[in-house]
Image (cartoon, rainbow, N blue to C red):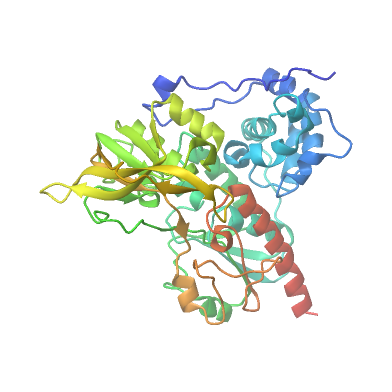
């Protein structure tokens, strides 16, 4: 029986005035009853438009119908046929611009809560199933994955299922890439990430940490060690700055550094000695998801937080849910403002940020209206910390130590539709190719690369 409600079943959440003082997960998840009720909103459309919106092509109507029938473990198996990280994707994927955007129910109300149901199914499996994935019989061929973010984990999983001996080389001391260093605990608990990685190890994937490829070992040296193909999934972790006065002052962070200290190095916990500024007033420059994560983290560390963004709310690229949560938590939005200078005190520390008001002009190459400064509108905001969140690019180390591999003007690897780079046997995907994007798009690139690597090695060994 179809649930004709025009609205999704409401997701239980921590109260905004409580959660903005802790790092516990904001969304609390559906109960079984809630999940079944939401699943019954699905029309099980003949043409399945939601699948077209999923970069890894999960059979969404099938798993939702299984939830509606209370066959939760079957639903999990359906999802993991194509998506190895459902607990993660259910929490952080922008479903509103992907699968849910295509949902027919969204034409006359809210779309089916596909992400919420995916999260429920994955969490149910973690609690109720002790079954581990089975390791495939080895085919004798070795593949190296550089980076353990979502693209690398996906590529490794798909290749391991085909019998390849896969080793992931991770630069940090903990695997997970952006899932562990970039996304805060209150959006994605690290225990969830670890469980997904443990499942990968059960498939036989070997993960080596503290391995900075290009420094500890080069790709050429790995080739000499018997690796027949490579996937570069190193993400885009090098921060960009505005090149304005004052960016070298004490108290200026890149969002990547700030979030890495908090998420990976646990600076928010009293029993960790990771240094981080305990700010009174923070300015976060930028309007993407990373800016929201940095702002909401700073709020939880006790600061009064301003997000400074040069366009209007409509142009802001962050997910609507993240913007809504940030507003609920008491974060101030300084829209149509752009920093022009960071001001320091006698101790060379941040004391204020000077901004200028903007107005929107004609659309630029991105299709968004270009912000134009309003003369004479300069003003000062007193802050003791500035966090820059205006974009990132890939680390140049692999490019510099790997002859024959090309990058574009932003430092991203050049790869074709099969994720093949300009050097034979080397593939790349995710943020290392596209620049900062989404977890699920990176996973889609990892799946494509795994197929291409399989074809390449089979052809090479005919």
* Residue 230 image position (x, y, % from top left): 61, 70
In this orientation, which residue lies closer to the viewer: 85 or 375?
Answer: 375
Task: Assign the C terminus to one quadrant of the image.
Answer: bottom right
**Residue 291 in which image quadrant:** top left
Residue 126 visible in rendering: yes
* Residue 28 image position (x, y, % from top left): 55, 25
| Residue at (67% x, 47% y) in the render | 84
Tell whether 385 sits left or right of 213. Answer: left
Tell whether 460 sits left or right of 309. Answer: right
In the rendered view, tell whether residue 130 sits above or below residue 81.
above
Residue furthest to the right in view is 46
Residue furthest to the left in view is 346
In the rendered view, tell whether residue 454 sits above or below residue 380.
below
* Residue 57 image position (x, y, % from top left): 75, 47
Tell whether 34 sits left or right of 280. Answer: right
Task: Assign the N terminus to one quadrant of the image.
Answer: top right
| Residue at (74% x, 22% y) in the render | 36
In the rendered view, tell whether residue 425 sits above or below residue 261.
below
| Residue at (56% x, 69% y) in the render | 413
Tell whether 315 sits left or right of 166. Answer: left
**Residue 243 in which image quadrant:** bottom left
Residue furthest to the front in view is 375
| Residue at (56% x, 77% y) in the render | 405
Residue 202 visible in rendering: no
In this orientation, which residue lies closer to the viewer: 85 or 13?
Answer: 13
In this orientation, which residue lies closer to the viewer: 429 or 28?
Answer: 429
* Residue 297 image position (x, y, % from top left): 38, 37
In this orientation, which residue lies closer to the viewer: 230 or 26?
Answer: 26
């Amino acid at each position: 029986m179809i649930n004709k409600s025009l609205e999704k079943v409401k997701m239980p959440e921590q109260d905004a005035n409580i959660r903005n003082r802790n790092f516990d997960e904001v969304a609390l998840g559906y109960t079984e009853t809630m999940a079944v009720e939401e699943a019954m909103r699905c029309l099980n459309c003949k043409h399945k438009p939601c699948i077209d919106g999923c970069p890894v092509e999960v059979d969404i109507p099938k798993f939702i119908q299984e939830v509606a029938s209370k066959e939760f473990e079957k639903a999990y198996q359906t999802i993991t046929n194509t998506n190895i990280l459902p607990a993660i994707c259910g929490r952080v994927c922008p479903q509103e611009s992907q699968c849910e955007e295509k949902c027919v129910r969204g034409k006359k109300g809210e779309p089916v809560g596909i992400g919420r149901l995916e999260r429920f199914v994955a969490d149910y499996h973690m609690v109720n199933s002790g079954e581990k994935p089975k390791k495939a019989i080895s085919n004798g061929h070795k593949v190296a994955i550089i980076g353990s973010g979502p693209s690398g984990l996906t590529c490794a999983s798909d290749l391991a299922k085909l019998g390849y001996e896969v080793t992931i080389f991770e630069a940090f001391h903990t695997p997970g890439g952006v899932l562990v260093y970039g996304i805060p605990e209150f959006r994605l608990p690290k225990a969830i990430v670890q469980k997904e990685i443990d499942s990968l190890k059960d498939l036989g994937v070997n993960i080596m940490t503290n391995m900075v490829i290009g420094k500890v070992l080069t790709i050429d040296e790995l080739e000499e060690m018997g690796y027949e193909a490579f996937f570069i999934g190193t993400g885009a972790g090098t921060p960009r700055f505005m090149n304005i006065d004052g960016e070298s002052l004490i108290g200026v962070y890149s969002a990547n550094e700030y979030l890495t200290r908090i998420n990976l190095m646990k600076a928010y916990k009293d029993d960790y000695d990771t240094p981080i500024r305990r700010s009174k007033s923070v300015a976060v420059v930028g309007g993407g998801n990373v800016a929201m994560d940095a702002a909401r983290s700073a709020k939880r560390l006790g600061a009064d937080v301003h997000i400074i963004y040069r366009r209007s709310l409509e142009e802001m690229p962050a997910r609507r849910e993240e913007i809504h949560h940030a507003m609920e938590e008491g974060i101030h939005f300084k829209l149509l403002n752009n920093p022009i200078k960071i001001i320091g005190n006698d101790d060379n520390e941040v004391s204020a940020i000077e901004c200028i008001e903007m107005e929107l002009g004609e659309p630029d190459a991105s299709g968004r209206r270009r912000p134009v400064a309003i003369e004479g509108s300069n003003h000062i905001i007193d802050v003791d910390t500035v966090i820059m969140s205006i974009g990132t690019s890939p680390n140049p180390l692999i490019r510099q130590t790997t002859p024959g591999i090309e990058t574009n003007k932003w430092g991203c690897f050049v790869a074709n539709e099969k994720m093949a780079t300009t050097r034979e046997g080397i593939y790349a995907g995710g943020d290392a190719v596209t620049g900062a994007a989404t977890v699920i798009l990176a996973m889609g690139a990892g799946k494509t690369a795994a197929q291409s690597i399989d074809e390449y090695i089979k052809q090479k060994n005919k």
